[in-house]
Image (spheres, grey):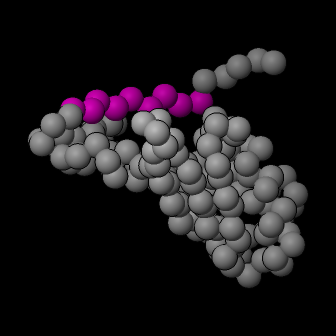
Amino acid sequence: MTEKLLFTGKTHIAGGSNGYARSNDGTLDIKLPQPHPAAENLFGAAWSACYIGAIELAAQQRKVALPASPEVDAEITLNSDNGSYFLRARLNVSLADIDREIAQELIEAAHGICPYSKAVHGNIDVETKLV
């Protein structure tokens, strides 16, 4: 396997009541006065963006034309059990004007493509729902 670097995201985060997150390229610049729910929201946004790209790639590989861009509503929950913290995720995916069986195949295939899905595989409970 020949590895090829495609992109490096660089961010600077500061905590506290005046906390913030900024990317070096200026595409991200937000206030973070509290670490939560900001962390879960940012994770959900990043994962969803990656997952949409993975759905589009899965469609392209299968020669399926997408009449509309995929949409994802992510729900990332922070949970605790006896002092141990863990995440759960639900990805509600909308693929308009696509046969439901084909749409389901695409969203399942996307988990094998998306690096975020691969990173959490077996580490957190993930529910993917076609809406």
Q: Is residue 34 left or right of residue 42?
A: left
Q: Quadrant of the N terminus?
A: top right
- In the depicted structure, whether residue 5 falls above or below residue 28: above
Q: Quadrant of the C terminus?
A: bottom right
- In the depicted structure, whether residue 66 falls above or below residue 47: below
Q: Is residue 53 visible?
A: no
Q: How many marks?
A: 0
Residue under the image location 53 percent in, 66 percent down: 73
Q: x%, y% of residue 30?
A: 25, 48
Which residue ends up furthest to the top in the rendered image?
A: 2
Q: x%, y% of residue 70?
A: 63, 67
The quadrant holding residue 9 is top left
- In the depicted structure, whether residue 82 falls above or below residue 103: above
Residue under the image location 21 percent in, 32 percent down: 14
Nearer the observer, 121 or 61: 121
Which residue ends up furthest to the bottom in the rendered image?
A: 97
Q: Is residue 70 magenta?
A: no
Q: Which residues are magenta?
A: 6-14
Residue under the image location 32 percent in, 36 percent down: 23
Nearer the observer, 45 or 89: 89
Q: x%, y% of residue 62?
A: 87, 57
The quadrant holding residue 6 is top right
